[in-house]
């Protein structure tokens, strides 16, 4: 497994989520489109598609998982803020 492929994809996905956000629950996931974009960006950085494929069985599935984690983190953070607001009243 390629450490540089793992690092590249994790960084790319994190930056993409920060830039684009994540879809609302139930909305169409951009994971397949993002997977293709990520592979293209990796190739431009000198990381072949085969190296990405070796590191990730299903890149789109990985991206979907990252999107879900980002959504859950955001919901948890907003939930904590709502709890604090209720305590202040």
Image: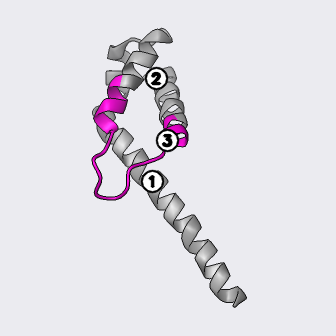
Q: What is the x, y in percent for residue 32?
A: 28, 34
Work out how far the residue at label 3 is from the one at label 2, CA to CA, in angstroms. 18 Å
Precedes in sequence: disc 1 or disc 3? 3
> Which residues lie in the magenta part?
16-36
Q: Say which residue appears at 48% left-offset and 8% top-offset.
A: 46
Give left or right: position of 36 versus 89: left
State how far apart marks 1 and 3 are (Cα): 11 Å
Colouring: one colour
Asked which secondary structure carries label 2, the reply is: helix
Mark 2 surroundings within 10 Å by alpha-carbon count, few (fewer than 14), some (14 through 19), many (20 or more): many
The residue beneath circle 3 is 17
Q: Which residue corresponds to mark 1?
A: 69
Residue 2 screen position, x and y as percent: 45, 21
Q: Does label 3 or label 2 sit earlier along the sequence?
A: 2
**Is residue 56 at least partly visible in the picture?**
no
Residue 79 place in picture, x, y as percent:
55, 73
Which label number is shown at residue 5? 2
Q: Nearer the viewer, residue 3 or 19?
A: 19
**Is 45 located above or below residue 53 in the figure?**
above
Query: Which residue corresponds to the image point at 45% horizontal and 17% vertical from the top-left?
Result: 42
């Amino acid at each position: 497994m390629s450490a540089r492929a793992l690092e590249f994809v994790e960084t790319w996905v994190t930056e993409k989520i920060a830039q684009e956000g994540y879809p609302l629950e139930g909305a169409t996931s951009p994971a397949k489109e993002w997977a293709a974009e990520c592979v293209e960006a990796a190739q431009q950085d000198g990381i072949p598609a085969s190296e990405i494929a070796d590191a990730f069985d299903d890149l789109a599935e990985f991206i979907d998982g990252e999107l879900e984690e980002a959504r859950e983190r955001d919901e948890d953070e907003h939930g904590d803020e709502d709890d604090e607001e209720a305590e202040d009243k």
